[in-house]
């Protein structure tokens, strides 16, 4: 099963850089240009992982993350916040919004790829556990 990654950043150069860094990761990529576009792409693209910039127009990455994590239909999507913000308060705010991980810019390619691969493995394991849980529940109901 091919995993899906959504890159959400209002800066075209940043989106292109992240796409180039992820070229060796076996996945389908999609991009979003702001917070509202990100939420729309979550509905249409159904990503497994979102690389989410914090400082975006219309809706910040913090607001987008919070909405995704509060929605039961999307709460299992993994979110890696990628941002120039690196103050402790920003990290705390990202964690409060529900992010699964946090990466500061400038992004190191090796670190990004490793985190993405690990997050996709974790998502795969989580999805498989959910499928097994549903199967067991169906068998018990028979």
Image: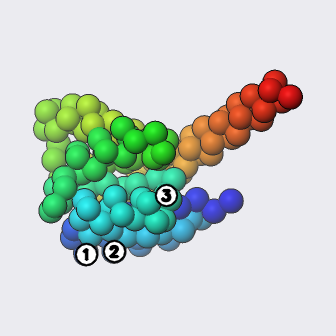
Q: Nearer the viewer, residue 34 or 91?
A: 34
Residue designated by label 1: 12
Q: Residue at x 16, y 47 (%)?
A: 85
* Residue 65 against residue 138 in the figure, above or below: below
The answer to whether marks 1 and 2 mark residues whose Cβ atoms lie closer than 8 Å is yes
Q: Crowdedness of circle 3 by 10 Å Cα count: few (<14), some, many (20+)?
A: many
* Mark found first going from the N terminus, 3 or 1: 1
Residue 103, which numbered label?
none
Q: CA distance from mark 3 to mark 1?
A: 20 Å
Taking the image as shown, residue 119 lies to the left or right of residue 80, namely right
User: What secondary structure is found at the residue carrying circle 2?
Assistant: helix
The answer to whether marks 2 and 3 mark residues whose Cβ atoms lie closer than 8 Å is no
Q: Residue furthest front?
A: 142
* Mark found first going from the N terminus, 2 or 3: 2
Nearer to us: label 3 or label 1: 3
In the rendered image, which quarter is residue 91 located in? top left
Residue designated by label 2: 16
User: Where residue 134 appears, x then y in whole percent?
Assistant: 71, 34
Residue designated by label 3: 47
């Amino acid at each position: 099963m091919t995993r899906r990654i959504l890159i959400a950043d209002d800066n075209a150069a940043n989106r292109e850089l992240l796409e180039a860094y992820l070229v060796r990761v076996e996945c389908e990529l999609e991009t979003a240009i702001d917070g509202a576009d990100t939420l729309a792409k979550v509905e249409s693209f159904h990503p497994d992982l979102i690389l989410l910039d914090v400082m975006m127009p219309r809706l910040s990455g913090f607001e987008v993350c919070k909405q995704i994590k509060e929605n039961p239909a999307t709460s299992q999507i993994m979110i890696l916040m990628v941002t120039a913000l690196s103050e402790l308060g920003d990290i705390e705010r990202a964690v409060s919004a529900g992010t699964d991980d946090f990466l500061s810019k400038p992004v190191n390619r090796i670190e990004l790829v490793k985190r993405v691969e690990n997050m996709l493995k974790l998502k795969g394991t989580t999805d498989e556990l959910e499928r097994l849980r549903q199967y067991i529940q169906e068998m018990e109901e028979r």
